[in-house]
Image (cartoon, rainbow, N blue to C red):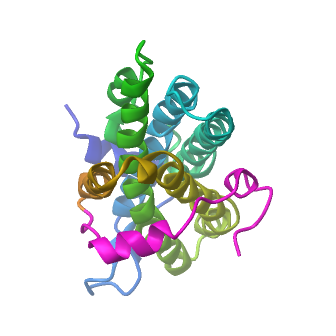
Amino acid sequence: MKSNGRRARERLMDRGFDPDHAIGDSGTTDSIDVATFYDILGRMAASEKAGQSPTYSLARLALRAGLPSEAADTLFLAYNQQSAEEAGHGDKVFGNAYFSMGGVAPGGEHSVFGEGDDVASVLNPRDDPSENERSLGITAARIGGIETFALQYLFPLVSKLCDRWDHPIGRDLARQIRDVVRPEESRHVLIWRYVFHRTIAPKGPARVDEYLQNTNAGRTQLAAPAFDRPTLERMLGTGAPTARQLLGKERVS
Ligand SMILES: [Fe+2]
Ligand SMILES: [Fe+2]
């Protein structure tokens, strides 16, 4: 049986790509080959897509978490929008770039988070609103941690590789990351801030600590370094973003 890596190389060659072609200065630690770049795109596509299901669940959980109605409504709309956007990043942006290079869709098994069902099942609403509020806080923090790393590190990394590759697929991908993915991800990080200020901070220091720990747990899932507390506090800011900012109807200054 052929290994996945071998099959991926064959698919690249069938489409006219040299899997060993170096992106960046060959021989330096800064350089990767086209086969590795292709693998990264598959992982990004599947991992972004895996964000669709838990955020869809969070939208519904927000309505059952005993929150003030304005916060519940805001979180429903924001998470619903995020769910659609994660599907777009997975399928439309990274998935289509991956497809263009090899002629197959990325599989859910490429996701670094599993296929999303495990997270989604713990987000099924329970009868007790306080349990739902707690699940919402835990998951919001973890997703926020993941997204801070994606925004600050992963997307810039892929954009840099695209620039060095200098191929139409890479140029198109870099443009979509700049124009679509990064602005949307910035708003997803605002949801992390909103949940903190509206639902966690009023409940006192123990819940605040838990939120910060779960944020770092999300980062650890990607093998990203944990943030220290001053950094987290600075990123969370001093107040909740507005509903219009969360939905992208108003810019954050
Ligand atoms: Fe995303
Ligand atoms: Fe996101």
**Up-down relation of residue 82 to residue 217 (above or below):** above
Task: Assign the N terminus to one quadrant of the image.
Answer: top left
Does the segment drawn in magenta span residue 59?
no
**Looking at this view, is 179 or 118 the one in front?**
118
Where residue 199 sits: x, y (%)?
A: 48, 45
The residue depicted at 42 percent of the width and 12 percent of the height is: 127
Where residue 178 sits: x, y (%)?
A: 65, 69
Where residue 225 sits: x, y (%)?
A: 24, 69
Q: Is residue 82 left or right of residue 189?
A: right
The residue depicted at 27 percent of the width and 87 percent of the height is: 28
In magenta, the rendered stretch is 224-253
**Looking at this view, is 95 or 153 the one in front?**
153
**Looking at this view, is 206 or 123 the one in front?**
206
Magenta-highlighted stretch: main secondary structure? loop
Q: How many marks?
A: 0
**Looking at this view, is 239 or 74 the one in front?**
239
Where residue 146 sits: x, y (%)?
A: 38, 55
Q: Is residue 242 left or right of residue 239?
A: right
